[in-house]
């Protein structure tokens, strides 16, 4: 396949076209993913998540520049929310990282969530693989910033950085319900604001309440991304976590679990598509829905019948 050959040869245009094909599910998308798969598994994957307004994009910009100084090639997948009304997305993260777009060692791709919950697009994992196969040393996924539900990032990243900011009102509210559990490293950004010390103490207290046996206690780093302060210390913490993952064997187990989850998700998606295309559009299904509506049948019987049909 010429497109994949060009991608392996370092063509940024081929990478962009491959991502477009996969994101829009063109006819050649699966063939592309099959062809590039043997070349994946080499890049380090960093997820950056946190509440809206925490300065994730600005911090991402600074982190990338520090890694560029180390000679790294970096891919960035910036996820933006898709409007449920128009179907469009602003994709504004690229504006905040505008000066990176001209760097030949950086490739930025903005994606809309297209209705997916959990802070990521359904095609995020495939785009990460394409950047990995292209030869990126580090792939950064920046989530939409939807608050407590954006925990999907932990299924896609080796290291998850949770960015918090003082002064959002109820700080505990901002770090509970899943966000705390997914953080491998915490960054308190805009640390020159009032309330930074209190937020730091609250995170430490909540980490102390974690009853799980953990070998890695997430460090808390303070940054002022707009002034490039504290970023070096943050990168040291991110590097230490990745070294811990490699040395402890957890990197291998996390990636194995990710592969398992990915295959299960693909199976579920294929079954869902089959049901949507072959079953729910049939006259028989419509008559079954009518029977349930008239209380002549029940939803459980209909679902069992559908599953029997699918499994055949």
Image (tube, rainbow, N blue to C red):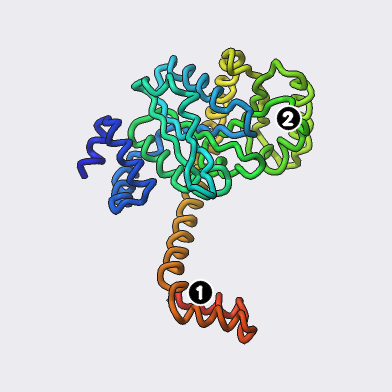
Q: Is residue 192 in view?
A: yes
Q: Nearer the viewer, residue 130 or 298?
A: 298
Badge 1 crowding class, 10 Å Cα cut-off, few under 14, some 14 to 19, many 20 or more, is few
What is the number of the mark on residue 168? 2
Local SS, label 1: helix
In the displayed structure, does residue 2 sit left or right of residue 115?
Answer: left
Asked if residue 196 is positioned above or below residue 11 in the image, the reply reads above
**Residue 221 pos. (x, y %):** 65, 21
Residue found at the very far front of the displayed protein: 86
The dot on residue 152 is none
Q: Quadrant of the N terminus?
A: top left
Q: CA distance from mark 2 to mark 1?
A: 47 Å
Q: SS class of the residue under badge 2?
A: loop
* In the displayed structure image, the side of residue 193 where residue 311 appears, left or right: left
Tell whether label 1 touches label 2 (CB within 8 Å): no
Looking at this rendering, what residue extends furthest in the bottom direction?
296
Report x, y in % for residue 8.
27, 35
> Toward which corner of the image does residue 203 lie, by quadrant?
top right
Q: Image check: 50 left or right of 29?
A: right
Q: Residues within 10 Å of mark 2 (few under 14, many from 20)?
A: some
- The residue at the point 27 percent across, 30 percent down is 10
269 sits to left or right of 213: left
- Mark on residue 307? 1
């Amino acid at each position: 396949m010429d497109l994949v050959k060009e991608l392996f040869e370092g063509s940024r245009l081929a990478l962009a076209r491959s991502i477009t094909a996969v994101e829009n599910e063109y006819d050649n998308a699966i063939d592309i993913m099959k062809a590039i798969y043997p070349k994946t598994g080499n890049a380090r994957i960093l997820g950056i998540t946190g509440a809206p307004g925490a300065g994730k994009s600005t911090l991402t910009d600074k982190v990338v520049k520090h890694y560029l100084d180390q000679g790294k090639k970096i891919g960035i997948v910036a996820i933006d929310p898709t409007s449920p009304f128009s179907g469009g997305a602003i994709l504004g993260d690229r504006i905040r990282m505008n000066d990176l777009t001209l760097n030949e060692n950086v490739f930025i791709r903005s994606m809309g969530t297209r209705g997916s919950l959990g802070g990521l697009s359904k095609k995020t994992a495939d785009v990460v693989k394409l950047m990995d196969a292209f030869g990126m040393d580090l792939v950064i996924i920046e989530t939409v910033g939807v608050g407590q539900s954006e925990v999907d990032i932990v299924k896609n990243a080796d290291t998850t950085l949770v960015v918090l900011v003082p002064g959002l009102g109820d700080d505990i509210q901002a770090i509970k319900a899943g966000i705390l559990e997914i953080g491998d490293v915490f960054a308190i950004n805009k640390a020159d604001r009032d309330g930074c010390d209190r937020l730091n103490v609250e995170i430490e207290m909540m980490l102390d309440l974690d009853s799980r046996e953990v070998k890695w206690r997430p460090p808390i780093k303070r940054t002022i991304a707009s002034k490039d302060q504290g970023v070096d210390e943050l990168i040291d913490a991110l590097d230490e976590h990745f070294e811990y993952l490699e040395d402890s064997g957890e990197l291998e187990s996390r990636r194995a679990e990710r592969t398992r989850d990915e295959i299960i998700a693909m199976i579920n998606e294929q079954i869902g598509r089959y049901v949507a295309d072959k079953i729910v559009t049939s006259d028989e299904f419509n008559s079954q829905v009518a029977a349930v509506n008239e209380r002549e049948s029940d939803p459980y019987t209909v679902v069992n019948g559908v599953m029997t049909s699918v499994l055949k």
